Amino acid sequence: MTVVINMRDGIDERKLAVAVRFILDGKLVAFPTETVYGLGADALNEKAVRRIFEAKGRPADNPLIVHIARFDDLYLLARDVPGEAKVLARKFWPGPLTLVLPRGEGVPDVTTGGLDTVAVRMPAHPIALALIRESTPVAAPSANISGKPSPTLAEHVVDDFYGRIECIIDAGETRIGVESTVLDLSSEKPTLLRPGGLPLEEIEGVIGEVRIHPAVRGELVEVARAPGMKYRHYSPNAQVILVEGPRDRVRDRVTMLVEEYRSRGLRVGVMATREYDADEFVHLGSTDVEVARNVFRALRELDKRDVDIIIAEGVDEKGLGFAVMNRLRKAAGYRIVWA
């Protein structure tokens, strides 16, 4: 039995206490953040964290992000907090920035995927902050079956986990729509491990140039130092094809692909910033902010419409577009058609 708690109108202390009790008892609670919904458990409770991996079908070497509600908890989790981490935390927390730091002794191996680092962030959602503040640091990957598109609505979590976890907090649609930006500060040079809800340009405006890990561009890695680096992610049931290139040529190429697949008797869905004649179409919006908010919803929605092929229109990689393209390339399994 899964308890679904409606907090679309804001925090209800009585209802929140139910979710807090679940966390403290070692149970699983799906909760909203400003990025996507997370699947949370007590980060310091090894048995509880193992249940996250079991519920998601997540590989054990894929580390989790620990969510905190107080700056001081950073020192509880990390062995060393460099000056750049303090500057970035004060500037961007609460917010969609995850910092990878040397791991403290009290963090279980299961939470970090056995690594000597820990990933920490402070979410910018009042319900998430209240849940964590009233309980404990919470380990929380996105609340989806491993490999599937991340959830931006409680309905997405219900689809994946109803009857498999103890609690889902429904607070409506998430504001950003892609996961947090992950920055590794455990080595000599700050390194971007995952583009996300905080644009790289804003980080570099504070600490200067940031190295981009090759995995961000699709290179295979042996060790996943952050979520999303090693394994299949964000993929719907339908095959996804991503079309990249100059905007005018992309339109022509998408149109040709729709006609080609339909001639084979396949149902074709298109997700794009402009309208196309396809069996199913989902509009992503016209700005990078709108596209980021809608990209995972579009993948899930087209799956529900029973399409065989999803053709995704590439977007500019500036701002949140960098994170969007990272997710779309992974969703497509790097099946990219160049216009």
Image (cartoon, rainbow, N blue to C red):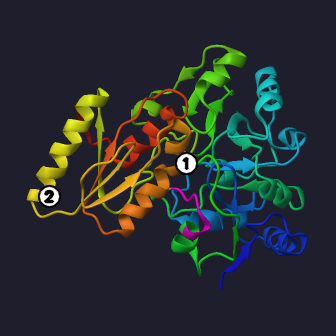
Spatial distance from mark 2 to mark 1, Cα to Cα?
29 Å
Q: Residue at x 39, y 36 (%)?
A: 220
Front in this rendered view, residue 278 or 165: 278
Verify whether residue 151 appears in magenta: yes
**The N terminus sits in image quarter:** bottom right
Numbered mark located on residue 262 in the image: 2
**The C terminus sits in image quarter:** top left
Q: Residue at x 36, y 43 (%)?
A: 274
Q: Secondary structure at mark 2?
A: helix
Residue 147 location, quadrant: bottom left
Residue 309 picture location, percent across and down: 25, 57
Residue 314 location, quadrant: top left
Q: Mark 2 packing: few (<14 Cα in 10 Å), some, or many (20+)? A: some
In this view, the residue farthest toward the top is: 208
Please name the residue that numbered disc 1 is placed on: 293
Residue 82 picture location, percent across and down: 79, 24
Q: Amino acid at mark 1?
A: Arg
Q: Which residues are magenta?
A: 150-155
Q: Is residue 162 left or right of residue 100?
A: left
Q: Mark 1 packing: few (<14 Cα in 10 Å), some, or many (20+)? A: many
Q: Secondary structure at mark 1?
A: helix
Front in this rendered view, residue 82 or 178: 178
Verify whether residue 251 appears in magenta: no
Our reading of the magenta stretch's main secondary structure is loop
